Structure formats: C-alpha cells, structure tokens
Image (tube, coloured by chain):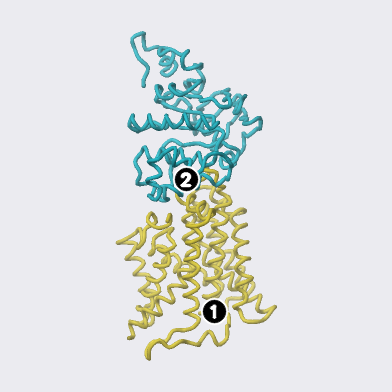
Amino acid sequence: MTLLQLEGVTGYYGHLQALQELNLSVNRGEILAVLGANGAGKSTLLSLISGELHPREGRVFYQDKDITQLAPHLRVREGIALVPEGRHLFGTLSVEDNLRSGASTRRRGTWSLDAVYELFPFVAARRKHRAAVLSGGEQQAVAIGRALMSNPSLLLLDEVSLGLAPVIIRDLYAALGRITAEGTTLLVVEQNITEALSVANYAICLLEGRVVLEGKPESLSQREISQAYFGHDLGPSSKAAS
Amino acid sequence: MIWVNAVIQGLLLGGLYAIFACGLSLMFGVMRLVNLAHGDMGVLAAYFSIILIEHLGGNPLWTFAAVIPVAALVGYFLQRLLFDRALDGGELSPLLVTFGLSIIIENLLQQTFGANDQSLNIGALSYQSWKVTTDVYVGRLNVIIFVIAVIVIIGLQLFLSKTRTGLALRATADNRRAASLSGINPKRTRSIATAIALATVAIGGLFLAMRTSFAPTSGSSDLLFAFEAVIIGGLGSLWGTLIGGFALGVAQTIGSQINPADGILIGDLVFLAVLAFRPQGLLSLRSVIAR
C-alpha cells in the first residue's frame, strides 16, 4: 500500500533544477534507500517531502491526501518526520528538552521519552547535558530520538552516517531495524551505500535529478550501482564507492 | 551612606528598566527581530491608561488589568499581520517596518494628545516612602515596581523552562529550522513571543508613567535604555536583561550622585564599555536563554 507518492515533481535548489519530473512511491512498512552522489538531488527530494521546499511542478501525496503545499510543521503533525543532515539539534537545550520538543504535535504512538532512552541507552545517561556538548554519534541518536517522539508514520533520514565512526554507524543502523518493527516506514538517504543497502528492501539511485536505477538491493549489481552513481562506467575491475 | 543610597535607588530603577526591556530581549531571541517601536509601545500603553482614567475614573493602578491583556492581543495580531511579513522580506525589512511604526505611533500620539508632558497620578503612593536607615529612604512605588519587575521576569523564565509553549519558544530561539521540523508552529511561537513582549512593555510603560512624566516622543529614549539593559546583560537572555537593568540603573544613579546632570551619560558610558570589552554581555546568550 502506498504511503507517499511523488508525481512528476520538479524541484529547484536555488536556481538549479535539482529534480526533473520525478516519480516516486514509498510503500507502507518498507525501507527505501535513496542513493546518489553529491548534487544528485537527494536533499532536494527530502526537502520536498518534509515541506521545506515546494515543487515548481508536480504533486506530493501522503496517505492519498495532496500535501504539496503543506507547511513542514503540519506535515510532522500528519506523521512525516525528518532527521536533517547535520542533525540540527537545539544545542543550548538539554538532551531531554530536545526530545520533548519533538513531541510537540502530541501524536499518539509507541514512542515516548522512556522508549527512546531504551532504544539508545547511552542517550539516557546524558539526558541532563546540553545537546551541544555531546559527541557526534550521541547527537545523531538524539536527532533520531527527537524525530521519533512525534511518532511518525514516515521517518526521513538524511545522511545518518555522515562523519561518524563505523562502530557507531552500526549501532544506529541496528536501531533502525527496531524502529521499523514498530511499523514506521523509512526513507534513508545515504552516500554510504553499503550501510543503506544492508537495511533497505528497495533502493533507487538518483543521478542529476533523475532516477537512473531502482530495484531490490539483492538484484542490483555493484557495477550497475557504480554506473548509476557516477554516471559512467568505471570498468569491470572498479568497485562502487562505499 | 550616600553611595549605598545611590546603589539602592539604582537597583530599584534597574528593575523598571529590566521589565521594560525583557520583551525586546525575548523577541530578539525568538525571531531575531529588533523592535525599534518597543519603547513607543510602552508609551502607547501609558496613553491608553490615561484615556481609561479620563472616561472611567479611579486610580491608574486598576488599568493594568485592562492594558495588559489588550497589549498582549495587539502583540499577537501585530505579529501575524505585520512582523511575520516583514521577517519574510529579509534582514532590513523588520528594522524599517518597526522604525516606521515608531514614527507613526509618535506622530499619532502627538496629533491626539499634543506634545505636553503627562503623568499617571497614583495619589499618595507616588511620594510615600519607607525608611531603611536614617539616611536611606526608598519610595514605596519604586519598591513595588522593583518587586513586580523581578516577579514578572522570574515568572517569564519559569514559563520558558517549565511549559510546553516555553519549550517551543526556546527551541525556536535556538534553531528555527529544526523547530519547524519538530512540528512546532513558527507563526504561533512568534505571535506568543510578541504578545508577551507587548504585555511586559505595557507594564513597564505604565510604571514609567507613574514614576515620571512622559510625552509622545518618550518612547525613543525609553527604547535606548531598554537596548542598553539588553546589551549590557547579554542579548536574548532574560536573567541577563535583569542584571543589565540593574547595572544601568546603578550606573545612572551613581552618575547622578557625582553630578546630577551626568546620570544618563554615565549609564551610556557603562553600556559602551560593555560593548567594547564584553560585547556578548555580562551573561551571554548561549549560557542562559536555553536553560
């Protein structure tokens, strides 16, 4: 069943056309990985879904409702939450206040302060600290927890692994499995292809604002992905960037 | 003893500056808007009180009950109808819009009430005093203003740190983008901030009008004192604004003690010294607003 659908969406990043008549549908309960190099249009895509950007052309449907012009905070109320790239925590607020601010829509669901602390025990230990003093991995966990506090049906994750140590990335991705177990649909935007494909049940690859490759992760070959990622064939001996 | 007296009188005066300035600080914190008409809005509240007394009579103290909610309501809609649009127009627009608003208010008041000085007559309370020592007397009104100012600022701080709406305000002040991505309605948050700002500046405006005389153009100098209190204390911090108000008040009364004409000048010099040597203010934004 389709949860989110983009129909012929054209999005601009400044004056640059970042997405060209993109069609995309996200099914309920799936984990969709969106891959692509810098400038492929991944962040623009997320902005269109989170509502920070409105498309020039095309429409966005969520739960069969047209939300093309809906403001970001109203989309959170409908159940779309974004964990932005760079985390954007409230640095001067305590960790607990960061999490509580995510609950401002009062959407009901399984996620609460206790549930988030259980998911990320290391965050619970830092609940009284200012968010700015946390390590990168802790901050990313708080950012995910803050989004979960709104009990989203669709959780958008932008470059979760960026700048983090592999061991922390593994922990965070392990948590994603538990989040989907609660019925949340995930859209994961990543440059870290290996991690993203390890959790996804479907993947699309963006290149210059278009979908150039899509399919189930197990059906995609390294060569296809690297070709889609870079826009040209690197030759049979080359490996996809990871 | 003269100096002790000057410090005490300065602290009492500082409480008034702080309540006058805290809304300026709040609005800047939440939406990075510098309201150049802030002082005029306090003066406007005082004229509103005068109208009420003219028509309904009684002691001006009762008009707080009418002026505060009206000011809050005006603030709410002012934000919705004017400031929100100005904020969408880039960095310069809010300055121009509030500056224009300041000119409009001052001229409308002059047109309606004339340029003469007025004051709110609260009867004996304006000259009664309490004896602290043989050399030090404190005006009852001044003490009342001080106590209420401190209560209002503590109350505002508690509101910010303990309530959902307060959390939304702090989150918005910290990171607007993240706030709206967390489901916080930015327009509602801004409107509440401006409603609070106008309610508090109305309290300050009425107290100022009871303490001294005022005229349509008083708003500009009141704004200057509010700015000084906010900057001395640290932009965007309520405790800072309280401390800044105290510092400015004490500087002015000590200055007046040295030479009666120099009070305001000394206050300005302290303000400039803070800008030169501790531009982040006595308490910096980072350390306080978010607590």
Chain under disc 1? B
For the point 54% across and 35% down, which residue is it?
Answer: A50
Q: Position of residue B267 (x, y in %)?
A: 37, 72
What is the display colour for chain B? yellow
Relative height, residue B162 to residue A145 (above, below): below
The dot on residue B278 is: none
Question: Could you say which is closer to the camera, residue B133 or residue B11?
Answer: B133
Quadrant containing the C terminus of chain B in the rendered view: bottom left
* Quadrant of the rendered image containing residue B196: bottom right
Q: From this viewpoint, is residue A21 visible?
A: no
Residue annotated with mark 1: B210
Question: Could you say which is closer to the camera, residue B198 or residue A2?
Answer: A2
| In the image: residue B94, left or right of residue A95 | right
Q: From this viewpoint, is residue B61 visible?
A: yes
Q: Are marks 1 and 2 on the same chain?
A: no
Relative height, residue A89 to residue B15 (above, below): above
Numbered disc in front, either 1 or 2: 2
Q: Residue furthest right?
A: B55
How many numbered marks, from 0 up?
A: 2
Q: Position of residue B288 (x, y in %)?
A: 40, 58
Q: Residue furthest left?
A: B277
Q: Mark 2 is on which residue type? A: Leu
What is the display colour for chain A? cyan
Q: Position of residue A187 (x, y in %)?
A: 51, 28
Residue annotated with mark 2: A99
Quadrant containing the N terminus of chain B in the rendered view: bottom left
* Quadrant of the rendered image containing residue B43: bottom right
* Quadrant of the rendered image containing residue A158: top left
For the point 37% across and 12% down, which residue is it?
Answer: A234
Give the class, few, some or many, for how many residues have Cα within 10 Å of label 2's Cα (few <14, many ≥20): many
